[in-house]
């Protein structure tokens, strides 16, 4: 017999209102167990063939697919079926199965652009795969790190981007030393080590040898000419520092030029670097005197203000070389805008200088133990003492290198917090 519906209206007959769903736990009476088909119900006789797959329960209209539970003589379930509707076009189905031609309902349509049926999003990443969400403090794929400026290059050899941490700063300092030690070492030896050695020999020659003694009454007695010797000693050291100041400023400017240009991939040479340093030496020397006076005044008031001023004005040199204006005020503001970051970087540089000073002091102590309190009394001891003083100055040369690259890298990192900058731009700003 054909499974087509009877001729007439093509619209299927809607089922009657099911009312409240039946309680599956309530016992079924014999009168309710079998309900004869009502007038207008369509009953499709069973078709020969393999048994059908269990389908949905019979609705109140009495319609049920052939050979399905819920046909005539079977109780219909508690869940009402959806209203009958036309089959979904394009959906295949076998005769007697939901969705086949002639059946009042079919399977839900499948979105051809969606994932296949039975597939779901994975709740955990596959072994060896990247985690699909950013780590704490990280950025989503395609978005910059919070606080980063769009123009920053995280691989820049000189500028440490924000949130790169102390490791990024150490990496830039080490990279600057690896690239430029061949040029930086002779510059530092000529402009920093030679003045330090000369001042050490002058100090050795003019250091007061007479010490206060205790008088018969127990009071200290100063030797004759003690204060004259003290003032002469410190005056000679200060004068030597002022004389060598322009040479030292030449070295700082030349070293900064080498670090910035090498990071930008530009050629450098010792002669060209020293010529640049000579052009900028007087200005840098003048601002060095101003910063030194402020630190000295702070130290005279109390040790802590002087130390604080030394930290706050530590970046005045790079600021003057790159920006050419207001280095003292700019260094003060930069220090307080990112207090912890600048304090930590400058503290590391000062720690290196303290280690170098301790090493030089140990050499001086050995010098005094070997050649006595007045080594200049004899030519032989004078030559030996001067040699040890020069050796102590040479041993402190790596500290000058660390001071140079540490302060330049710290300044470049602070510029990255203010806006987009890279090594090429910094090299261009030096002129």
Image: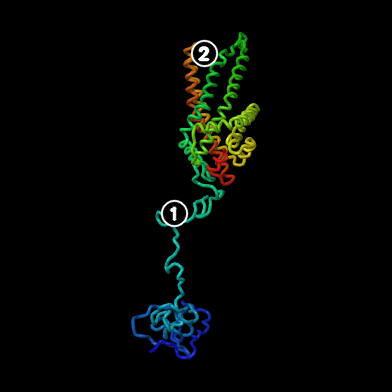
- Number of numbered markers: 2
Which disc number belongs to residue 323? none
Say if residue 381 shows up in the picture: yes
Residue under the point 45% across and 60% down:
123
Residue 171 % position (x, y) = 48, 40
Quadrant (top left/top right/bottom left/bottom right) for the C terminus: top right
Residue in front for this viewpoint, 230 or 28: 230
Is residue 343 positioned above or below 41 on the image?
A: above
Residue 160 % position (x, y) = 52, 43
Residue in front for this viewpoint, 204 or 358: 204
Q: Residues within 10 Å of mark 2 (few under 14, many from 20)?
A: some
Is residue 402 positioned above or below 220 on the image?
A: below
Residue denoted by label 2: 376
Residue 173 % position (x, y) = 49, 38
Quadrant (top left/top right/bottom left/bottom right) for the N terminus: bottom left
Looking at the rendered structure, the secondary structure element under dot 2 is helix
Q: Earlier in the sequence, mark 1 or mark 2?
A: 1
Say if residue 403 shows up in the picture: no
Residue in front for this viewpoint, 339 or 324: 324
Left or right position of 191 against 334: left
Which disc number belongs to residue 130? 1
Residue under the point 44% across and 54% down:
130
In the displayed image of the protein, which residue is found farthest to the left? 49
């Amino acid at each position: 017999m054909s499974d087509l519906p009877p001729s007439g209206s093509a619209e299927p007959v809607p089922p009657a209102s099911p009312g409240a769903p039946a309680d599956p736990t309530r016992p079924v009476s014999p009168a309710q167990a079998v309900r004869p088909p009502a007038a207008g119900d369509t009953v499709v006789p069973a078709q020969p063939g393999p048994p059908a797959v269990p389908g949905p329960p019979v609705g109140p209209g009495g319609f049920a697919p052939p050979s399905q539970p819920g046909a005539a003589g079977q109780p219909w379930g508690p869940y009402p079926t959806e209203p009958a509707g036309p089959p979904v076009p394009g959906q295949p189905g076998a005769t007697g199965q939901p969705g086949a031609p002639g059946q009042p309902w079919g399977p839900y349509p499948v979105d051809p652009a969606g994932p296949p049926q039975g597939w779901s999003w994975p709740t955990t990443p596959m072994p060896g795969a990247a985690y699909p969400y950013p780590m704490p403090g990280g950025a989503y794929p395609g978005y910059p790190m919070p606080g980063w400026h769009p123009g920053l290059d995280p691989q820049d050899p000189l500028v440490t981007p924000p949130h790169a941490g102390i490791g990024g700063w150490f990496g830039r300092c080490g990279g600057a030393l690896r690239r430029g030690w061949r040029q930086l070492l002779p510059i530092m030896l000529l402009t920093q080590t030679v003045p330090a050695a000369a001042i050490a020999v002058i100090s050795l020659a003019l250091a007061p040898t007479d010490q206060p003694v205790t008088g018969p009454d127990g009071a200290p007695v100063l030797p004759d000419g003690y204060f004259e010797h003290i003032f002469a000693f410190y005056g000679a050291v200060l004068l030597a520092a002022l004389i060598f100041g322009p040479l030292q400023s030449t070295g700082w400017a030349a070293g900064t030029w080498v670090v910035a240009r090498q990071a930008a991939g530009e050629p450098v040479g010792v002669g060209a670097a020293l010529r640049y340093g000579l052009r900028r030496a007087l200005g840098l020397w003048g601002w060095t005197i101003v910063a030194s006076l402020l630190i000295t005044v702070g130290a005279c008031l109390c040790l802590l203000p002087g130390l604080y001023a030394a930290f706050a004005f530590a970046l005045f040199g790079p600021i003057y070389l790159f920006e050419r204006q207001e280095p003292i005020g700019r260094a003060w503001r930069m220090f307080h805008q990112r207090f912890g970051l600048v304090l930590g970087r400058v503290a590391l540089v000062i720690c290196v200088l303290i280690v170098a000073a301790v090493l030089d002091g140990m050499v001086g102590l050995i010098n005094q133990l070997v050649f006595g309190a007045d080594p200049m009394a004899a030519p032989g001891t004078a030559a030996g003492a001067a040699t040890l003083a020069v050796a102590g100055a040479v041993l402190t040369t790596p500290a000058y290198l660390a001071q140079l690259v540490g302060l330049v890298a710290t300044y470049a990192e602070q510029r990255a917090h203010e806006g987009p900058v890279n090594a090429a731009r910094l090299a261009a700003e030096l002129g």
